[in-house]
Structures are given as structure tokens and as C-alpha cells.
Image (cartoon, rainbow, N blue to C red):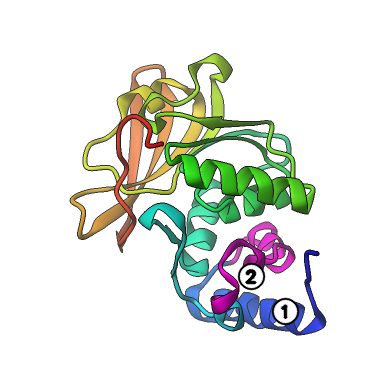
């Protein structure tokens, strides 16, 4: 049974207030989505009491669920509009996916860790969440069959820019991605201004789990 109590909802409201006032999130669509998605259902029950604090937690396959502030910031930078095709690299436990779905995005998501692919698939089913497509595969390759995408979000840090993903972006589209060495990445937004030209913006230092090639059973 998926339990989302008044206490959970109250804690979510406090989290949204924190994101608005302390982190500076101003996109009301992002804040509404963060208020809607029950983060405690995407993590282990031992962490449930702390689910709406701005903390990362361990999940399967030695990965982490990102800080709510990071999820909110990446979502805001993506500038999601209802009905846009969004490619998500790194489904993880499915929390970021759920936020993008709450923002009415059409989400195509890829996960390379089989444990997390299976976990998120089951979680989406339990919560009646419906990504357009969910894939177990290599994030560096993207999903060329479904390209081009309006937006691409990468939820893991890449040491080099995955150029194959840029190819799958529409002209006018945006990709949000952390780039840099394992210990610290810089969050960037690339806007495709022509088939071969991109505008690059930088948004500060973050720590993400590394983006890895291929798949891991």
C-alpha cells in the first residue's frame, strides 16, 4: 500500500517553502511538482522521516537519490513546457522522472543499472506513473529512435560531453548536464541554436554519481 499521509504532505509543503525561499526556485511548475511527488516512496523506509530534508540518500546499485534542491534546480533550468519530449539519462529510483511527469513532460528515460531499472519500473506501476518509454541501456547512446527531443536532462556527472546526446536535441532545445571529474562537477545548460551551434551556460559546482558507459546487470 502506497501511504502518503497528511504528515508527509505537510513536510512536502515545508520543503517547497525552503526551495522557494532559501534555494531561490521561482518556477511555480517546478514547485508544484515537488509538492505533488511523494519523495518518501522512492527511498528506503528507514530514511522516510528525513525524506523531505534537503539530503541525498543511498539507493540500489551504490547510487544516490539527489538532493531535492538539485532536482528542483535541474528541473527549473530545463524550462519544461507541457507536452514536450524529454530524454532523461539516469532514471535512478524514478524520483526525478516523477517530477518531470508532474510537470506534464513526455518522458523517455534510460537507466544502465538493472537493479534500478527494475525498481523504478515497479515503482511507476505502483504509483500509476507513465513515462512514454523506459529503457535499460547505455545513457551515452541516448534514444536515437525517438529523437529529436525538446529537452534532455542528465542526472549523473559526465567526465566528457556526450556529443551523441547533443545530436538528439531539437534546434531550440536545451540539455542540462553536470560535467567534470568524479569528485566535483559543474552544472551546464546547452541550448541548440543551430544544427551545429550551441550556447553554453554555467550554474556552479555540484556532486553527482558518475555517468558510465554500457549497462550493468
Give the CA distance from mark 1 to mark 2.
8 Å
Can the viewer see residue 204 in this picture? Answer: yes
Expressed as whole percent of the image width and height from the top left, the position of residue 193 reads 42, 27
Residue that numbered label 2 is attached to: 40
Expressed as whole percent of the image width and height from the top left, the position of residue 183 reads 20, 60
Position of 212 relative to 76 (above/below): above
- Which quadrant does the N terminus fall into? bottom right
Residue located 79% across and 48% down the image: 128
Give the total number of marks visible in the rendering: 2
Range of residues picked out in magenta: 26-47
Side of 126 relative to 201 (left or right): right
SS for dot 2:
helix
Residue located 36% across and 22% down the image: 164
Report the predominant secondary structure element of the magenta stretch.
helix
Q: Is 42 one of the magenta-colored residues?
A: yes
Near mark 2 (Cα within 10 A), the count class, few <14, some 14-19 or many ≥20, is many
Position of 174 relative to 32 (above/below): above
Residue that numbered label 1 is attached to: 8
Q: Is 103 one of the magenta-colored residues?
A: no
Q: Nearer the viewer, residue 172 or 44?
A: 44
Residue 38, quarter of the rendered image: bottom right
Can the viewer see residue 51 in this picture? Answer: no
Near mark 1 (Cα within 10 A), the count class, few <14, some 14-19 or many ≥20, is some
SS for dot 1:
helix
Expressed as whole percent of the image width and height from the top left, the position of residue 153 reads 48, 42
Amino acid at each position: 500500500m502506497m501511504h502518503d499521509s497528511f504528515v508527509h504532505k505537510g513536510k512536502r509543503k515545508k520543503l517547497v517553502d525552503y526551495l522557494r525561499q532559501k534555494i531561490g526556485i521561482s518556477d511555480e511548475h517546478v514547485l508544484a511538482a515537488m509538492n505533488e511527488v511523494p519523495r518518501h516512496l522512492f527511498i528506503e523506509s528507514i530514511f522516510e522521516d528525513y525524506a523531505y530534508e534537503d539530503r541525498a540518500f543511498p539507493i540500489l546499485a551504490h547510487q544516490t537519490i539527489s538532493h531535492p534542491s538539485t532536482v528542483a534546480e535541474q528541473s527549473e533550468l530545463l524550462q519544461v513546457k507541457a507536452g514536450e519530449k524529454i530524454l532523461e539519462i539516469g532514471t535512478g529510483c524514478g524520483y526525478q522522472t516523477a517530477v518531470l511527469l508532474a510537470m506534464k513532460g513526455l518522458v523517455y528515460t534510460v537507466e544502465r543499472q538493472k537493479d534500478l531499472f527494475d525498481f523504478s519500473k515497479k515503482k511507476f506501476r505502483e504509483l500509476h506513473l507513465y513515462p512514454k518509454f523506459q529503457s535499460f541501456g547505455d545513457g551515452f547512446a541516448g534514444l536515437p529512435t525517438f529523437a529529436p527531443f525538446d529537452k534532455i536532462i542528465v542526472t549523473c556527472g559526465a567526465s566528457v560531453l556526450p556529443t551523441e546526446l547533443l545530436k538528439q536535441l531539437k534546434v531550440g532545445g536545451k540539455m542540462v548536464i553536470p560535467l567534470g571529474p568524479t569528485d566535483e562537477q559543474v552544472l551546464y545548460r546547452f541550448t541548440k541554436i543551430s544544427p551545429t551551434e550551441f550556447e553554453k551556460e554555467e550554474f556552479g559546482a555540484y556532486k553527482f554519481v558518475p555517468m558510465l558507459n554500457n549497462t550493468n546487470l
